[in-house]
Structure formats: C-alpha cells, structure tokens
Image (cartoon, rainbow, N blue to C red):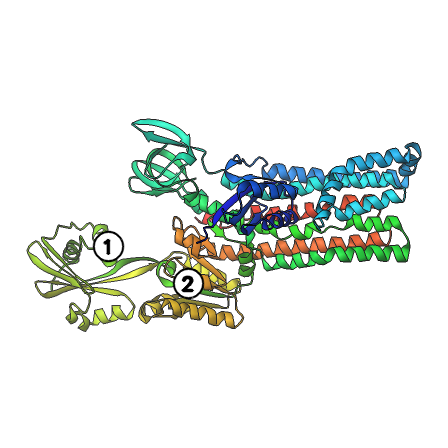
Amino acid sequence: MQTLQRLELAISGMDCPECCSHVREALEAVPGVLQVTVLLGSEKAVLTVDPERTDTLTLCRAVAQAGYQASPLAQRPREEAAWTPRRLARILLVLYALLFGAILLLDLAGEWLGLSERLSGLVPWPFGVGLTLLAAAPIFWNVLRAARRGRVISHTLMSLGVLAALLVGQWPTAAVVVFFMHVGSYSERLTSERSRQALKGLAALIPKKARLLRAGAEEMVPVEEVVPDEIVIVRPGEAIPVDGEVVAGRATVNQAAITGEALPLEAGPGSRVFAATLVQGGSLRIRALRTGSDTTFARIVTLVEEAEAQRAPIQRLADRFSAWFLPVVLAVVLLTLLLRRDPLAAAAVLVVACSCSLALATPIAMLASITAAARHGLLIKGGAYLELLARADVLLIDKTGTVTTGLPVVSEVIPLAGMTRYELLRLAASAERYSEHPLAEAVRQAAHSEGVAVSDPETFEVLPGLGLRATVEGCKVTVGNASLLPEGQRLAEAQRLAAEGKSLLFVACQGRLVGVLAASDRPRPGVEEALTQLRTLGFRHIELLTGDHEEAAASLAEPLGISYRARLLPEDKIAIVKAHQAQGHTVVMVGDGLNDAPALAQADIGVALGAVGTAVALEAAHVVLLREDWRLLPALVRIARRTRRVVLLNLTFTLLYNVVGLSLAAWGLLSPVVAAAAQSLPDLGIVANSTRLLRQRIVARADR
C-alpha cells in the first residue's frame, strides 16, 4: 500500500501569483509529487508526495532551478511583522511621489529640454549601451531563464522594449526604462510584503517560550517542546502557549485573539483556555491538552494561510484574461510598426503593458479581508466562499445549538395538590441530583437560582426513555414524561405548554401528581436583529430546519417571522439544500458544525457558529464563527460584498490602465520613459485600495 507524506517548504523570492505558478510547475514536474499548493501570502508550498520516490533535497533543488529558494518550513525562523500598516502607507506615498517626480523631471528634462540628445552626444554610444545592459543584467537573466522554460514573466515585455530602444539608438531612454524596471520590482516586493504582514502579525501572537513546572521547579523551554499533560505556568501579562485546562489559580483571560470578543473570561480550576490568549490580573497553572500545531490558534493560522488556495471564480476569470494578454500586446506592437512605423512607440507599448496587476487584483484583496475577519472571530476558508457569500440569497438555519443555545431552562413551575413552588423544586431537583439528562441539569439550575436546598436521594433509578424514580427524605418521587405519568396529559395547563413546544416533566410523590415543570431551549441573543439585517442585505428566503417536532419549531420560528420545517433527518436537510441550488439560488447553511456537517458541506457556504476549540467544526464548515455572536453573520455578508467591490475596482483600474496606456503608447502620445514609470502604478494602486480592507470594522465594539 502506498504511503503518502505531507511536506511543507518555505519558499523565498516570490513576488506575485505568476511566481507561485512557476514554483508549482517546477514541483509538479518532480517524480513522486502528487499534489502541490503554493501560497504567496505565507511564502510556503504544501505538497503531498510519495516518500519512496522523492525527498526534501530533490524538491528544494527543483525550486532553485526555477529561480527561487526553498528549505524545510521547520528551519525557517519565525518572523515578526516588521512593517506596520502606518509605515507601509508612508512608503507607498513616498514611492508615488518619487514616481511622479521622476516622470516630470525626466520627461521635462529629457524630452522638452533636449537632455536625452545632449547625453547621447556626450557619452559614446557603446559606453551608454554597456551601462544600460549592465544595469539590466539581473532582470534580463530572470527573463531569459523564464523563456528557457517557455514562460513569460512581468518583465518580459519591458525587456523587449529596452532592446527596441537600444536598437534605434535611444540608449538614454532604455536606461531610464531599466531604472523604472527596478522601481517596479521594488513595488512588487512591497505589494507582496504588504499582503504578508497581516499574516505575520497573526502568527506572532503565539508565544515563543513556555514556563513549565518540572520536578518542582520552573523551566523556560521553546513552545515546540511542550508535550500534552505537562503543567504550564502563565503569569500576568503573558500569553498562554497551549490549549489546556486550568488546574490552579484564577485570572482574567482576554480571548480576543481566538474569538474576537472584547469581554474577557474569568478563568479558574476546570476552565478551558486556548493558546495565544492573554492572562490579565492573575496567574494560572494549566495542564496542556493540545500543543504546537495542534492548538486551536495554530489551526486557525494554518487555515487562514491556506485559504489563499481556494481561488475565487473571478480570479480564474482574470487568469484566463492574462493568458490572452501577451498575444494582444504583441498584436498592438505589430500594428504600431506597420501603421505608424515608429519603433519608439512600439517600445512604449511593450513597456507600458502590465499583466502582473491583473493577477494581483483579486488575491491581495481576498487575503486582506480573510485576515481582518480572522482577527474578529470569523474564519473564512478561501476567497471562493467570499465571492459566493457576496451573492447569496437563501439562508437555512439549524435550530438546536444555532438559533437556540442548546441548553434547556425551566420556564414554568406549576405546583399541584397543595404543593408549594419551593417544595416542588426541592423534590424534583433532589430526585434529579445524579441524573445526566439535559433536563435534569435544567431542573438543578432552576432550584439553585431560587435558593432551594437540595438533598441527596436515598435511592435512585433511571428509567430509560421515561424518567426516573428516587426516594427523597422517605418520599417516593417519580419524575418523567407523559409516558411515565399519563395522568398529567389531562391537565389543561399541560396541554397548553405542550402546544407551545415545551418539554414537560411531571412530578409525583407517593404516587400522586404534585406538579409540572416545563422546559424550553433559550434563543440566542441577537438572532432577531441579525435576521432583520440579513433581509435588508437581500436574503429572499430564510428558513429554520430542525429534527424537533412542529410545535417546538413553530414556537421559535413564528416570532422571528421565518418559515420552518420540522422532524427532519440529516438527509432531508441535504435534499432541501439541493432543491434550492437546483432553482439557481446560492445557499448559506448555518449550523453548529457537528450534527449538521453533511448539510454544511452541501451548501454553497456552510457556516459553523461558536466553534472555538471544536476540531470537527473547523473542518466541516467553509466559514467558522469562533464566538456565539449572531451579529457576525450579517457582518460576514458585508465583508464579502465590500471585498467584491474592492476586487471589481482593482480589476477595473488595471484594465482601464492597460487600455488607455496601450492606446496612448500606440499613437505615440506616451514616451517609453513615461510608460516605464507608469508601469508600477497599477501594482501600487491595487495594494493601496486593498489595504483598506484590513481596517474595516466588523462588529461595532460599542455594542458589546
């Protein structure tokens, strides 16, 4: 049987999606490589390989032959987010100013004042050409290396423009174009680095070291060396390095890194805590449960990194357009030479063309939104789901654990036969003291909230599917459903409560019915407000799907103003999703990520609510809301639509630039110098426009 292995390589030298394609092609050509995903944002390649046919050294050599550098990911030192958004914004502004200043200076001095002609006369032609070729050598080498493999890179057309300028004797023009080619390379690196900064900032939240209690003494070790069941000590102001359970101490824990929630957790013995969350106002001793790459936060970072691989349909459209870009440009060059017989105009056409910006327009915006959303507790697994969300119009919602908390509470206490409310709760809670049924917990919580003293039952017997019998202070108490105590069904009050969809517990003492307890699942706060916002956002159909009975579904759905379907099996939910999809609708399915995983997977966008720490939910859904806050759902749709607007603006800008630039260059209205300077503008415009998505407001803090 073939044993496959998953490998991750750190890749350096990639500046744009074209670079990712080159690395992927090089790795796919290696025998034994079955699958390759290259991620620009996290600068890595994820491979599935046959270890008997290839190894890490062979893979690194293949990447090196493609013109990039590779090494095992574990050997790459962890990088901090070196450039803040403010600093990058300043660099962008300075670069824009330099570009426009250089355009004005060189065009004014070179063209209007005749500096180019004087320079050509003063400097011997061979010397000028030699300097130009020397300055262009690194770029030409990359172009030639790509050409040998049948590839066209962003500098291929510009290099042809440089050679055309040299051939007609305009070496000063060629030299200026080379200068702007270097400026363009820097702007590409800046663009790709800007997209990586948010990911680096996210990964930097994980602490590098952990303080362990070993043999009664404290010891600082790299966080990678911590193993499950070890005791980790975390002091005030420190980040927790593992997922674990508090065994000693009390502290306030800021969980914003995981859930985006501003309100902290008051942690004590028995509390579950997560890596990358911050301890405030106390100290904790934590038994490690998950460490390293298995922690919830590490999995979130990995999923955010790999979200880049889920390419949006609009990105694939841009890729197809890019494939036609080179033939179109060469056709324009040929027509310019035939009709205008102007070599410099043809050179300007080659120089001004910018295909790289088409490839950058979508992924940078998508990655910015995905990273910004992750910081606020929304985990989106790819740009494809953002694009689908932007046009979604049908919302299907699971009931238990999604619209409701999944935890029943006692809502009605009806004493009978002269029994007081206090006595009824005391008998029921004492009988249920050791029961594990969810309704038993609801009864105990009701007694506790009303200050009822609960005693230990002398005897205790569970009756599966019916209820239980117990002896409480010499009284034989029976607590159960109507099948156990059928006389309770005849009560008008019981019939009314059952019609409202509530679960009933009948309590008998010494064989006599003494009371009725009604329990119901609590709706989550903010559901009604969120559904109102979603209707405003254009969702035409919102429906509740549940395996519960009709009465329970109606009692929840009707106040919310939505339709419902009850008594559904998992396959029924899948069939409903498929029926809406067959009618041309884009379906969002919201569940808890566990029992409705098949429907989440079938939907165009499956959303798991409140799935922090739940590995199944992280894998099952396309989008995971890491805290139980319904306001995140309309916020998610707004993120998707805002991202779509930015992407469309990016594409419109770069297409308009190319159409106008090629037209002006072909008519001789754009000199090669100005064309070279303008070539960097689309990249800078795209990164400036996409950066706005990192600063978008997800949910207003004031509402919390």
Q: How many marks?
A: 2
Q: Which part of the image, by quadrant, shows the N terminus?
A: bottom left
For the residues bearing labels 1 and 2, Cβ distance under 8 angstroms: no
Displayed quadrant of residue 557: bottom left
Looking at the picture, how far across and down is residue 173, in whole percent?
85, 41
Looking at the image, the residue that sits furthest to the right is 121
Residue 579 shown left or right of residue 555 in the figure: right
Residue 146 visible in the snapshot = yes
Of marks 1 and 2, the one in the foreground = 2
Tell me how far mark 1 sits from mark 2, CA to CA. 30 Å
Q: Which amino acid does label 1 sit on?
A: Glu
Looking at the picture, how far across and down is residue 593, in whole percent?
40, 57
Looking at the image, the residue that sits furthest to the left is 474
Residue drawn at point x = 70 percent, y = 57 percent? 323
Q: What element carries label 2?
A: helix
What residue sits right under mark 1 in the picture? 441
Of residues 489 and 175, the one drawn nearer to the viewer in this rendering:
175
Q: Is residue 446 above or below residue 57?
A: below
Q: Residues within 10 Å of mark 1 (few under 14, many from 20)?
A: many
Residue 598: give its label.
2
Of residues 650 and 604, the one drawn nearer to the viewer in this rendering:
604
Specify which label sits upstream in the sequence, 1 or 2: 1
Looking at the picture, how far across and down is residue 644, in whole percent?
60, 57
Looking at the picture, how far across and down is residue 655, in whole percent?
72, 55
Residue 101 visible in the snapshot = no
Q: Is mark 1 on a helix, strand or loop?
A: helix
Q: What residue type is labelled 2?
A: Pro
Q: How crowded is mark 2: few (under 14 residues within 10 Å), some or many (20 or more)?
A: some
Residue drawn at point x = 29 percent, y = 62 percent? 520
Of residues 647 and 639, the one drawn nearer to the viewer in this rendering:
647
